[in-house]
Amino acid sequence: MQGLGRAAKSAAKSLAQASTESKNSALQAAATAIREQRDQLLAANRADLEQATQRGISSSLRDRLVLNEQRIEAMARGIEEIIALADPIGSVIASWTRPNGLKIERVRVPLGVVGIIYESRPNVTADAGALCLKSGNAVILRGGSESSRSTAAIHACLVAGLRAAGLPEAAIQIVPTTDRAAVGYMLSSMTQYINVVVPRGGRSLVERVQAEARVPVIGHLDGNCHVYVDRDADVTMARDIVLNAKLRRTGVCGAAETVLFDRAGAAAAPVLKALLDAGCEVRGDETLQRLDPRIVPATEADWSTEYLDSIIAAKVVEGVDEAIAHIARYGSAHTESILTTNQATAERFLGGVDSAIVLHNASTQFADGGEFGMGAEIGISTDKFHARGPVGVEQLTSYKYVVRGSGQIRPV
Amino acid sequence: MQGLGRAAKSAAKSLAQASTESKNSALQAAATAIREQRDQLLAANRADLEQATQRGISSSLRDRLVLNEQRIEAMARGIEEIIALADPIGSVIASWTRPNGLKIERVRVPLGVVGIIYESRPNVTADAGALCLKSGNAVILRGGSESSRSTAAIHACLVAGLRAAGLPEAAIQIVPTTDRAAVGYMLSSMTQYINVVVPRGGRSLVERVQAEARVPVIGHLDGNCHVYVDRDADVTMARDIVLNAKLRRTGVCGAAETVLFDRAGAAAAPVLKALLDAGCEVRGDETLQRLDPRIVPATEADWSTEYLDSIIAAKVVEGVDEAIAHIARYGSAHTESILTTNQATAERFLGGVDSAIVLHNASTQFADGGEFGMGAEIGISTDKFHARGPVGVEQLTSYKYVVRGSGQIRPV
């Protein structure tokens, strides 16, 4: 592992000054290799799937493991989207001249070495590898053991890309999953090599990483997102947005898990009816239970629960201030939306809610780097340090100050 | 301590939405109180000094403890400079509109609660307290036990300011220094209250904080700064800058600790003579030792040593690439300067050195928030995460995304 770390750090030094052309050229060659080696990828994946089936894997987990022609093409296309992104490295974030003539620039530089720890989905190997390379970072990838052959096969394509572009092969390394101590080691004993760790996976993985990491972590634990339907909400808009926020895709972190209704409004009945008619289970407080026999009683635990399923908690609140307080108490600081035609109420919510993303009259499912125009993301951060919200190429960077003078010395 | 944390977190919620006027008004009232309570401050300080003398404190440590009329006035003036700074909170860092009509803004918000752990110098209470307040953060201050009465007296002035402006008194709290377990507790057991810790003090304090903290830390361990005198340096400029970089003030983190000379240049003799004539000890490699009998032999350890004294290490290198390599190996990623008239060589150095601050033809002593135009700083960070270089009000903030729509739902 130390050797991996040293190689990554050394590769990071070269990468920091790699031209945009060479990085894009490596990415293009990698995308081409992925398409050309489709058969090898599928074969490696079949071997992983066979082993997983023998071990009695669940069907939803199996689905995450699967590579097929669609997903392979999506990997290649995802890399090409990253090629199209502007290269953040070297860009001047701010510049100014001091009274003494010093010209100061704040310039973007890579973070250095990124550690990605993930489970199941082999395409993370390509997505995360490509994002790190584009942002000038070396990356150490530690995927799940169940997808080890698929990961290795994808990695080989990425390395072929690096080689073709003359970039160091250690820019993208994978950690053998046979080394069970590797994850703990990456988190606690490689602080001199790894600048930041990004966990991609289920709750227990993220919890473990956050608990054990002695390096900074970018990520989020929970996406307990809320939609608040104010008294001044347009009822039709409320119904459409709440349906989309809950049911567009229930497994994403931006899916709404609780809907709050202003007691003084009239949207609860039509909105909840629409959810129930669409097959969603609604767990409501006492007031809401009376609206429909299909509504199940909610308990205290429901306000903090991220269902990742066709289930939503529903509660009545006394206006926007109680909505803000409820979110502050039970939310995970991820994504929250207010539906209202009242501008002042909207601004009160947008200012008062301390989450990574706050929306007015839009679905929480927009919590996504692509939807934000960032092209691709490595995940969403709910922390307030370094990066918050969708983490794309720009967030995988740091900066330095470049000061140009003409002999200035500082007075005593 | 848990009570302190809860109170801070609660105060942080109010502060996040406090107007610029109320924050500035609290700061002005605090500055006034500091001037008006000069006698109380001096009396408290005398008691601290008496106790310190009884305990046999060194004279340089005693000097750090001392409050006199000048330093009290400097504290008040420092707060007034912070009042004059632009309020970063609420400012829109970036904004854009998506094809689907969503208007996205990245807006500055406070970090939340900042923990400051410091030693000796009581004025940190005022400086750090004021910076945190201006940036909308609540702060928990844990000063040195040797300045406990001075710290408490200054804190009382800050609280008077908060009270006068109608802001929560828990916005600025001090931790009693009689609680010896408090520092360790702040670092490890208050992760749900404290968003970031800033250590202000000597090496062993910073080392301890970095080792034990379970929350993010902003700061630096070493300021092992370099000046590289290239073959194309202007010799007179080199002499003036190296003298200033080393000797302007030897105890600051931006003081140059090693000077590297290009073998092909002619500046070594005049520059080293000037340093020696000014009373600076020079520890040189074999080549440089021959230049002057006053030059002492350098050992391997000297390249990594931050002297904070009138001592400098000096070495000959084969041009800019070896200078870059030397700095990468021995430096602390703080501040490095290249002296040359060759633009291409300068750009090679500025691009190739991965430190927080890189300068061309200017003294490393400019590594300072005030000199950068940031008004005031809480310290200098050598980390690459969140903040790098001088840490001022802007760096004590995070951001959130505010998205304004008109009913948009996300397609499947």
Image (cartoon, coloured by chain):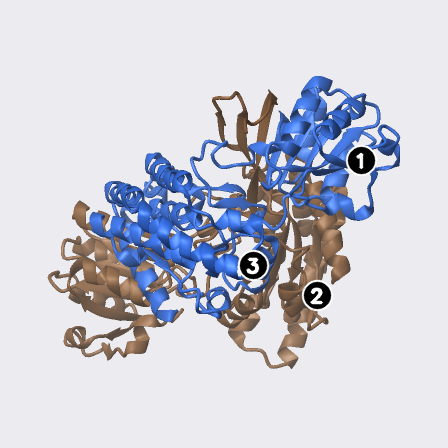
Chain colours: A blue, B brown
The residue under label 1 is A315
Q: Earlier in the sequence, mark 1 or mark 3?
A: 3
| 10 Å crowding of disc 2: few (<14), some (14-19), many (20+) | many
Looking at the rendered structure, the secondary structure element under dot 1 is strand
Is A103 placed left or right of B31 in the picture?
Answer: left
The residue under label 3 is A56
Host chain of mark 2: B
CB atoms of marks 3 and 2 within 8 Å: no
Looking at the image, is A202 positioned above or below residue B399?
below
User: Which residue is at a point 57% across and 49% down the rendered structure image?
Assistant: A59
The C terminus of chain B, quarter of image:
top right
Q: Nearer the viewer, residue B124 or A205?
A: A205
Q: Which mark is residue B149?
A: 2
Query: What is the three-letter code of the residue carrying label 1?
Result: Lys
**Cα–Cα span, label 2 and label 1:** 51 Å
Q: Position of residue A318 (x, y in %)?
A: 83, 31
CB atoms of marks 1 and 3 within 8 Å: no
